[in-house]
Amino acid sequence: MPQEGSRMNEDMTLRSVTMNDADMLLEWRNDPETRKASHSTDEVQRNEHISWLSRTLSNPNRRLYIAEEDSVPVGTVRADLFDGVWELSWTVSPRARRQGVAKRMVGMLANQILEPIRAEVKTGNIVSARIAEHAGMEFQRETDGVLHYKREALG
């Protein structure tokens, strides 16, 4: 997994999320385009979000990063460990969309994980499907409106 503030390529870094990022993450999560692409499309209330973030930061099987370009937050990428497989999920800041941010940050995190990785993408979310494929995952199956992607362990 990336080290705090590690430089991953020429213009993007991943850093661990802190509670200081709560309001920004909530804003991104409740953006209409983000909600449309999420498994849960409901707007998240602040107290619910703070509780989730607190649990997330203390969960040893979850890693949550902010992607920054020139010290400006542009997105977030998460890895959750289930049965030896890291499930990746991501959100791009509304102000940074359509600039290749997700492709870069997901690819960077995927390259740091030696274990198998997977992602679930809602059917019709062509952009996220391409991001999963760019990160080395292959389409496995579709169930209940969700596309399942997976990459085996590296090495």
Image: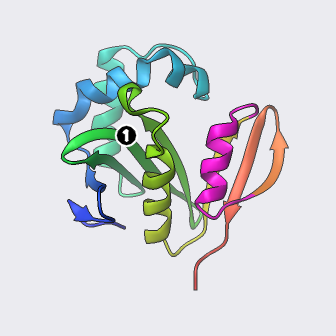
Q: x and y percent of residue 110 in the render? A: 50, 63
Q: Is residue 5 above or below residue 92?
A: below
Please, which residue is most extreme toward the bottom here? 155
Which region of the structure is painted magenta? 123-138
Q: Is residue 19 above or below residue 36?
A: below
Q: x and y percent of residue 136 in the render? A: 63, 64
Residue 150 within the segment the image draws in magenta: no
Instruction: Judge left or right: residue 16 versus residue 84.
Output: left
Secondary structure beneath dot 1 equals: strand
Image quadrant assignment for residue 26? top left
Q: Amino acid at mark 1?
A: Gly
Image quadrant assignment for residue 112? bottom left
Q: Residue at x 44, y 18 (%)?
A: 31
Circle 1 residues within 10 Å: few <14, some 14–19, many ≥20: many
Instruction: Judge left or right: residue 120 versus residue 48.
Output: right
What quarter of the picture does the N terminus occupy? bottom left
Q: Residue at x 25, y 65 (%)?
A: 7
What quarter of the picture does the C terminus occupy? bottom right
Q: Residue at x 33, y 39 (%)?
A: 74
Find disc 1 in the rendering and name its residue: 75
Q: Residue at x 42, y 57 (%)?
A: 61
Instruction: Judge left or right: residue 140 versus residue 34.
Output: right
Q: Is residue 74 above or below residue 83?
A: above
Q: x and y percent of residue 2 in the render? A: 32, 66
Query: In the depicted view, which residue is nearer to us: 33 or 45?
Result: 33
Query: In the depicted view, which residue is nearer to us: 32 or 56?
Result: 32
Query: In the depicted view, which residue is nearer to us: 97 or 91?
Result: 97
Q: x and y percent of residue 124 in the render? A: 75, 31
Query: In the depicted view, which residue is nearer to us: 42 or 71?
Result: 71
